[in-house]
Amino acid sequence: MGTAVPPRARSEYRCTECGASQPKWAGRCDACGEWNTLVEEVVARAEQRRGGHGGTGARGHGAVGAAPVRLGDIAADAAPRFRTGLAEFDYVLGGGIVPGSLVLVGGEPGIGKSTLLLQVAARLEAAGIPTLYASGEESPEQVRLRAARLEEPTAGVPVLAETALERVIEQAGAVGARVVVVDSIQTAYSRDLEGAPGNVGQVRECAARLMRFAKEAGPAVLLVGHVTKGGGIAGPKTLEHIVDTVLYFEGESALDHRILRASKNRFGGVDEIGVFAMTAAGLVPVANPSEVFLAARHAGISGSAVTALMEGSRPLLVEIQALASKAGFGTPQRVSAGLDHRRLAVLLAVLERRARLPLADLDVFVNVVGGVRLTEPSADLAVAAALISSVRDRALPPEALFLGEVGLGGEVRAVSAADRRLAEAARLGFSRAYVGARTSLRGAAPGLELVRVDHLEELAHRLAA
Ligand code: TYD
Ligand code: MG
């Protein structure tokens, strides 16, 4: 009789693993077959009427009836990248922000995500590229307090304290923003979906909607996503396949430098890193990361070895520290920071069996200095050298570098891009490099004596000499 029907909600079940939705609950997901991953979600009426607008974002991409375009007909310079001038940030993205792209900046709370993106917005705004900084976490006054600490031209940045996604998109259109910062995706919510901000459904829907906004209207969107120490399930991990680029901001919040790493990039190389120092006036790009990571090194201390990692296309020298000490009662402890504990267990077993290093009754601690994480096996030889040095309580030669992967037989294998790693070591004054016997080198690194080792036992023997 003309009275409005109150909106009725219906439930659906979304898989936290693959993101697919299904109408009925089951023990496992119909789409990916994972067990116990379905979570109930209430879908508001408004969304139903629009035929499931949103969700995975598969529908409604681009204008209806768009015709195919030949790649050759698309002007190559149609969309030049936005450069912030924060050298390390631009570098990690592959040369600046791509218009129309969706970039996720993940990291633990307090690591500096808001600081970084406020600096980015300030620089772009000052360069004449309109921005919008939408914060769901802080009031404009709080953002201003942070801005006051920065040596950046922040005065012109439009700040919006808003958590409703529809309002953020509307305001971005109103100010004609070319780069929009959404801080953070966990505080954003869409009115079309019930459920609190931060739940998987809201997070995914908001990201999918921002993706459409970016692709249709053309601004780049930079999303902040909090990651907890344990890896954060309802947050950034579920967004990685939606967004174009994923940058993780890492480091120990207590130390003053931070590493920005591209873990996915549709428009540039992955695993590229940029290093920043967190100063009293915000983040400052570090031009010579190796020097910073080695700066605090003390010569003459046992258990310290240096290796050269390849981070994307750039070499990075880091120090690895090991400490082996007599264990108390029970099973000896094996603790590692920056190195996978399973990798450490393998290396300890290989050292014990193949190089006859007595480790069984020792507690072992391994640390990669500066909050760097070892992701490639090329650091094995350095970890082994640090352990040998600690067990014998005898310092390694301070000017030596260790480069090699260690196999289960104790054999030392060659690593990729050895030339570039050795060149960086030579540049920083290293004069000797222990490398796998079969390491192939195109040219000799100037001023670097090469010691080729075939096996861990040989390394142990040479270090004792
Ligand atoms: P923030 O950007 O708020 O972190 P996130 O958004 O990732 O949670 O950074 C917080 C930390 O950075 C805080 O501990 C203070 C520190 N900081 C500085 O050291 N210098 C500065 O200039 C600023 C703005 C912050
Ligand atoms: Mg923040």
Image: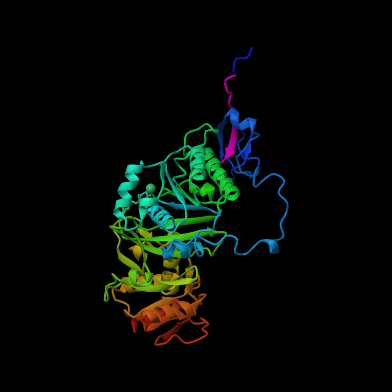
In the rendered image, which quarter contains the N terminus? top right
Q: Position of residue 28 (x, y in %)?
A: 61, 39
| Location of residue 373 (image quadrant) | bottom left
Q: Position of residue 190 (x, y in %)?
A: 52, 36
* Residue at 61% in and 43% down: 56
Residue 109 on the magenta segment: no
When the figure is inspected, residue 418 is found, relative to residue 56, above or below; the finding is below
Do we see residue 356 in this rendering?
Answer: no
Q: Position of residue 129 (x, y in %)?
A: 47, 55
Asked if residue 68 lies left or right of residue 143, the reply is: right
Asked if residue 351 lies left or right of residue 267, the reply is: left
Counting the numbered discs, the total is: 0
Asked if residue 279 lies left or right of residue 401, the reply is: left
Q: Which residues are magenta?
A: 5-17
Q: Position of residue 307 (x, y in %)?
A: 40, 73
Do we see residue 118 in this rendering?
Answer: yes
Foreground of the two, 94 or 347:
94
Foreground of the two, 129 or 297:
129
In the rendered image, which quarter contains the C terminus? bottom left
| Location of residue 27 (image quadrant) | top right
* Residue at 30% in and 56% down: 254
| Location of residue 366 (image quadrant) | bottom left
Q: How is the image coloured?
A: rainbow
